[in-house]
Image (cartoon, rainbow, N blue to C red):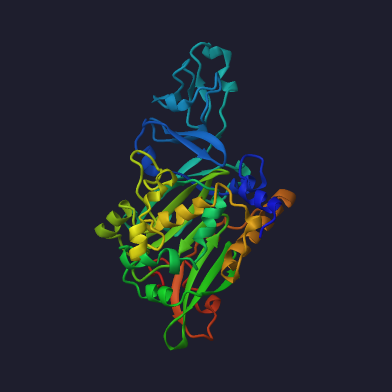
Amino acid sequence: MLRKEYNDLLTQTDPGTSMGDMFRQYWVPALLASELAENDCDPVRVKLLGERLIAFRDTEGRYGLMDEFCAHRGVSLWFGRNEEGGLRCPYHGWKYDHTGQCIEVPSESAESGFCQKVKLRSYPLIKVGDVLWTHMGSEENRPPEPAWEFANLPPEQTYTSKRWQECNWLQAMEGGIDSSHVSFLHSGSLKTDPLFKGAKGNQYNQNDKKPVFEVVESDGGLYIGARRMAEDDHYYWRITPWVMPSFTMVPPRGDHPVHGHFWIPIDDENCWAWSFDYHPTRALTDKERQAMIDGYGVHNQYVPGTFRPRQNKDNDYLMDREAQRRGETYSGIWGIAMQDASLQESMGPIVDRTKENLVSTDNGIIMARHRLRKACEALRDKGIQPPGLVPEHQQVRSAARVLPPDQPFKDAMKDDLTVRPGVKQTSV
């Protein structure tokens, strides 16, 4: 179990909280680049870490991310006019540039200097891959730009989506580092999902439902190893990297693309589940990309015009009891992503961890909580920057491999767990 004060520490991310301050040290995904596809396009509401913001792209293509509300009367700038190098409030015409600086107040003379005194809180917004990233901390502590492999490959090799998940970021992220549930919750989908089926590793998942976990610290977080029995008394290892605070990768299967996630707080009771697929050495096929668009793999279908999943708590995730009885889906929920999300949301907005009873397969979760708490307290009490900020910590891969019993995965798979440009993922 986790004591309440530690649970509060890890789950609260509003301004002024310890975990919120830690998240603000990182570049975090804010929007898909497609949400601001053109100059002078419609502004977009963004909520991150408890802050309500507005994003826009100006006439010259510069991205802006700033306080949603006009400094005059507090009107939401989502109603604003994006025109001629800035966002203009429709109420009284105050206009802001992409840095949040007020550049025009029609009721005041330019000579008065009033505009120069008005500036909305703003954050940088940069495009790396198909994602727009922001850093919400101080400029003097701004880390290097994101160096994740998926974000720095040619666009034909990658695909990224996001969904609104109605629970705290931590319980969503903890699902991303829990390999033991795959043999149960996803057992039906492993046979039918086009982005998973056909891999030899699926057989090992199904044949051994009692994985042994071995967790190794990395510079940026953890390598969480799940060991199952293979042929000839060998072990099938699936290694899940976790990089602080909320990056996770799914161990690959065959030549299928590699999957992963970021779990980014919207507020304390909601998060963005960012999901990416990529292949290190080839373009995604048309069938693979279409499957991702259609909601297979780690992706999902949507309520039209939104990032809310089509399967959600208001419709009981379109649960199909007959499919559950037939064994097509273990939980009755279609799709790997929503199988996870439905159960994580069922815990409530913030799960009460004082009531849980953890077992040996939860060692990755236990160690991740411990590292998060230590890093959070070190930043708060001593100003020590947390792991995961530098490119070296982000150059990680997930991997799956069969090894003889006398070879520890941390030694035998060291190269497999590191980005090697031009070398495909290690998979079974």
Residue 50 occupies which quadrant of the picture?
top right
Residue 81 occupies which quadrant of the picture?
top left
Going by the picture, which residue comes out furthest to the left?
286
Residue 141 is left or right of residue 89, and the answer is right
Query: Which quarter of the image is occupied by the C terminus?
Result: bottom left
The one nearer the camera, 6 or 127, is 6
Residue at point 57%, 32% (across, down): 121
Query: Which quarter of the image is occupied by the N terminus?
Result: bottom right
Residue at point 47%, 74% (across, down): 209
The answer to whether residue 265 shows anywhere in this view is yes
Residue 243 occupies which quadrant of the picture?
bottom right
Residue at point 34%, 72% (across, down): 199
Residue 30 is left or right of residue 5, and the answer is left
Q: Is residue 354 above or below residue 186?
A: above
The one nearer the camera, 7 or 220, is 7
Instruction: Please provide percent x and percent y for residue 314.
Output: 42, 43
Instruction: Please provide percent x and percent y for residue 266.
Output: 52, 42
Q: Is residue 159 above or below residue 113?
A: below
The answer to whether residue 146 shows anywhere in this view is no
